[in-house]
Amino acid sequence: MYLRMAKRVLLETDKRLLLKFAWIMGVKGFLSMRRHRARMARGEFFPPFLYVSVINSCNLRCQGCWVDVGAKQQKIDAPALNRLIRDAKAMGNCFFGILGGEPFLHDELLDVVGAHRDCYFQVFTNGHFVTDAVASELRKFGNVTPLISIEGSEIVSDVRRGRAKVYGKTMEGLENCLRHRLLTGVCTSLCRSNIEDLLREEWIDQLIDMGVMYAWYHIYRPVGPDACPELALTADQQLAAREFVVRMRSRKPIAMIDAYYDGKGNALCPAATGFTHHISPWGDIEPCPVIQFAKDSIHDARPLSETIRQSAFLRDFRETAAGATRGCIVLERPDLLIELMDKHAARDSTARKTMREELAAMRPHPSQFHPGHAIPERAWFYRFVKFLAFRDFGMYARRFRIENWRKTEAEEPIGARCDAPAPRGSEATVSWP
């Protein structure tokens, strides 16, 4: 598998783009993670990866979309985007996830990514606005990987995306990317209506034949004004998805991305572990894209590093989420999010201003956390990469120890030591005085 993947990378990609990816994502990305670990060890915080929703507008109306795509257009303008990126670069960051709405509706996006060629940008897009000219420009920059969202077959896509002929237009954008030999990925929000079509080996083989270099499966989250909770996956379906990804990683010459498990198969939440937070089109700093309330903004006078580091709200979110579950707090405990919102008097960062009511109406769903059913990585390369760069950074064990330390402080003499074990499923070890 590794030899076949190496052959694909060498023969099917633009070598200049490949070298740029290796330098920014490999070397600089590794150094960024080291700086993050060092900050965490000092008790400081700044996420090494930021999701940035640059615009709320979109041409589609997807089921379960949390973005106010029908509201008046709001975007982060180029000066604010440039300032955000510069502030993050000063902390060692080099990788940004660009979301929307539809990011390519932002008329200054190409200017921004072109101005920061020492960074790498992963753009989540439906592909409809990735014309031949846009793909050509991205190839010239060399620092963008388009991640094309495909949500099912032609019929399923039209229903999921709320528009007709979505699949064909998405495939046109994908073909433009591949024709220009961009490092291109395909992502899918797995739900009950598309899991049988896209969680298949034949689909992965089709992507490989087309020239797609990586695939990313997300788990559908029933949020937003049109939540469609009937599409949420069962626990068994989520375990099947995890097993499929692990199996394909050891057999197919295509990278398989996931953001919700460590190398030993333990579930984790990137926002709870401090790996990432999210910036909304209004500039609000949110824990993650689907949690739409905030106390802080990129438009604050302070540097971004200070705003995030000094945020009691974001810190409380990380501790609350890590203390509640290794999975997704949105799916499992929406009630705790309401408590956080009320505790910090956090503002609703949506245009519709109904986030609290939506959380109150949610019923719990299974997330990626299935105690006793961890599925470890089989491929040594993925185990190695996750050991280096994608772990829980001790957050789950740290939260557990903090709670027990506080408890024993009240029950035992000052100076008594807390040697409580980490919670079941956590492999992290954290020393605590």
Image: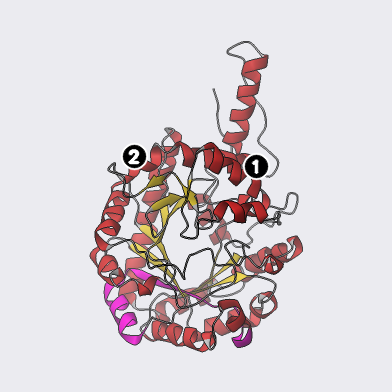
User: Residue at label 1?
Assistant: 324
Q: Is residue 93 or residue 375 the one in the foreground?
A: 93
Residue type at mark 1 is Ala
| Residue 237 coordinates in the image, percent (x, y) | 73, 66
**x 65%, y 46%: residue:** 335
Residue type at mark 2 is Glu
Q: Is residue 378 or residue 343 the one in the foreground?
A: 343
| Residue 426 coordinates in the image, percent (x, y) | 64, 43
In the displayed structure image, the side of residue 305 where residue 5 appears, left or right:
right
**x 68%, y 65%: residue:** 229
| Residue 208 coordinates in the image, percent (x, y) | 53, 81
Q: Quadrant of residue 383?
A: bottom right
The secondary structure type at the circle numbered 2 is: helix
Within 10 Å of disc 1 (Cα), the crowding (few <14, some 14-19, many 20+) is: some
**x 38%, y 58%: residue:** 95
Q: Is residue 319 or residue 48 the one in the foreground?
A: 319
Looking at the rendering, the stretch of residues picked out in magenta corresponds to: 131-155
User: Residue at label 2?
Assistant: 306
